[in-house]
């Protein structure tokens, strides 16, 4: 249990590395026969699971410090596992991305899950992989997943409405398939995450042809990835929480971010400006400062991870704010829309949900005790509310922040947050 008490923030801090880019780079390094050096490596739980997965399948992983305490990781890939059983933890990206990647190999390889991930859907992977020559079996559409290759190539259709994570893994795998491939995508969401994947593929020397609207992809097959040094940029998802903290409770300056990043959560800057916060962007730093906040409207359809911090922001904007696109919150670590409604009601904030939108009535936040639902982003949103509450917010299950941002509460304390 962590208590976040009313606080005034003022400080500068570097954000952690992007776990999304870290996992993508880990996958490309696994498929490269030489040694890749990942610089500014993430140490979050999801990144650790990706590294342990490839290590269990024969890759050589050397860390700069004990248990990934350093910021550099050396990966010698090129392993060709015949069979195996690997653990993905609670990382949906790890499970859905590595399934098509591991279908390149003969198998069988079993990908297991823990926690909330055992309830999240993976059935969208079965038919496309079969069409491309591999076999994928799930447990009634849920993990564990058993995959057998080799992935031959060919033509397949992918439904992009639930998640882009499987498609990301497929695009990483197809350059190494035995034949030319064509993927047709229906109902694509999360375009920015696919663009991040394509950037990693290009960085490691892969070629994927694409239509301008990302509805079709073609890969020649029989390619090879080339190992390289890969620097992981700062995490805009973690930064979104800290910048929102500055907008609510004082002044926070962030270093280590790319203003031109492809990460979709960069859109937090638009939401903060819409709410009246002071924002200043430079090549080196990004500043968010408290001002007179006003109700705002924002669509999270392309950046669903922004819903929890923006819900906390809306809770202190006098009047009713509307956050649309919350249908994208299905199949996350928790049912985030209902979890936010339930937990925010415990601390005095009213959240109404209907017609794919959350309407949040802002004003004073009473405070009290609330539950994280084992969801790192819910825990961080409750911490934001605690900063500007009347009596503080106690967060049960707060340790779940290790999934994406292990040092979150310590960093919040360094900025002036009163954490007990």
Image (tube, rainbow, N blue to C red):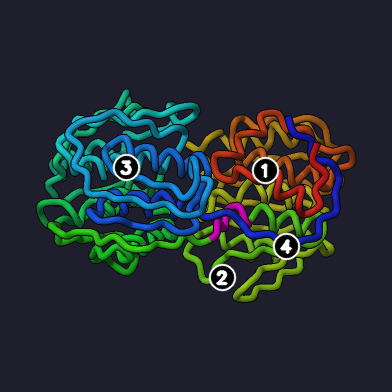
Q: Residues within 10 Å of mark 3 (few under 14, many from 20)?
A: many
Q: Secondary structure at mark 3?
A: helix
In front of the other: 399 or 216: 399
Mark 4 or mark 1, which is nearer to you?
Answer: 4
Farthest residue to the top: give it.
139
Q: CA gap, disc 4 to disc 1?
A: 18 Å
Determine whether, in the image, residue 46 is placed left or right of residue 141: right
Which label is found at residue 380? 1
N-terminal label among 1 and 2: 2
Q: Which residue is mark 4?
A: 12
Place of residue 274 in the rendered image (x, y in percent of width and height, measured from the top left): 70, 65
Q: Which residue is mark 3?
A: 98
N-terminal label among 3 and 4: 4
Q: Which residue is mark 2?
A: 259
N-terminal label among 3 and 1: 3
Quarter of the N terminus within the rendering: top right
| Residue at left offset 27%, top offset 37% | 57
Q: Residues within 10 Å of mark 2 (few under 14, many from 20)?
A: some
**Residue 327 in magenta stretch:** no
Q: Secondary structure at mark 2?
A: loop
Question: What is the span of residues highlighted in magenta in the rendered image?
Answer: 234-239
Q: Secondary structure at mark 1?
A: helix
Q: CA gap, disc 2 to disc 4?
A: 17 Å
Q: Secondary structure at mark 4?
A: strand
Q: CA gap, disc 2 to disc 3?
A: 29 Å
């Amino acid at each position: 249990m962590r208590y976040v008490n009313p606080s005034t923030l003022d400080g500068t801090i570097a954000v952690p590395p992007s776990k999304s880019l870290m996992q993508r780079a880990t996958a490309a390094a696994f498929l490269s026969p030489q040694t890749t050096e990942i610089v500014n490596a993430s140490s979050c739980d999801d990144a650790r699971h990706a590294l342990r997965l490839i290590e269990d399948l024969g890759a050589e992983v050397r860390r700069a410090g004990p248990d990934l305490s350093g910021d550099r990781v050396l990966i010698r890939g090129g392993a060709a596992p015949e069979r195996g059983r690997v653990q993905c933890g609670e990382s949906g990206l790890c499970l859905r991305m590595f399934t098509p990647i591991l279908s390149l190999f003969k198998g069988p390889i079993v990908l297991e899950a823990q926690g909330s991930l055992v309830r999240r859907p993976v059935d969208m992977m079965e038919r496309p992989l079969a069409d491309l020559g591999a076999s994928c079996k799930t447990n009634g559409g849920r993990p564990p997943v058993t995959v057998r290759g080799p992935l031959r190539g060919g033509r397949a259709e992918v439904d992009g409405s639930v998640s882009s994570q499987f498609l990301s893994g497929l695009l990483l795998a197809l350059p190494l398939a035995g034949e030319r491939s064509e993927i047709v995508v229906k109902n694509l969401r999360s375009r920015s995450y696919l663009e991040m994947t394509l950037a990693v593929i290009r960085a490691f020397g892969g070629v994927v042809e694409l239509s301008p609207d990302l509805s079709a992809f073609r890969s020649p097959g029989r390619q090879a990835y080339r190992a390289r040094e890969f620097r992981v940029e700062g995490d805009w998802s973690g930064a979104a929480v800290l910048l929102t903290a500055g907008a609510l409770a004082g002044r926070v300056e962030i270093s280590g971010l790319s203003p031109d990043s492809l990460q979709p959560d960069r859109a937090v800057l638009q939401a903060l400006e819409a709410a009246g916060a002071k924002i200043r962007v430079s090549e080196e730093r990004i500043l968010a400062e408290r001002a007179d906040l006003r109700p705002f409207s924002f669509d999270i359809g392309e950046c669903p991870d922004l819903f929890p911090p923006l819900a906390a922001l809306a809770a202190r904007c006098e009047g009713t704010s509307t956050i649309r696109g919350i249908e994208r919150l299905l199949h996350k670590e928790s049912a985030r829309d209902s979890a936010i409604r339930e937990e925010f009601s415990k601390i005095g904030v009213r959240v109404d949900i209907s017609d794919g939108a959350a309407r949040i009535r802002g004003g004073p936040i009473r405070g009290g005790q609330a539950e994280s639902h084992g969801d790192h982003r819910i825990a961080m949103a409750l911490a934001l509310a605690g900063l500007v509450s009347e009596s503080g917010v106690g967060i049960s299950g707060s340790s779940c922040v290790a999934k994406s941002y292990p040092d979150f509460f310590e960093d919040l304390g360094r900025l002036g947050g009163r954490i007990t």
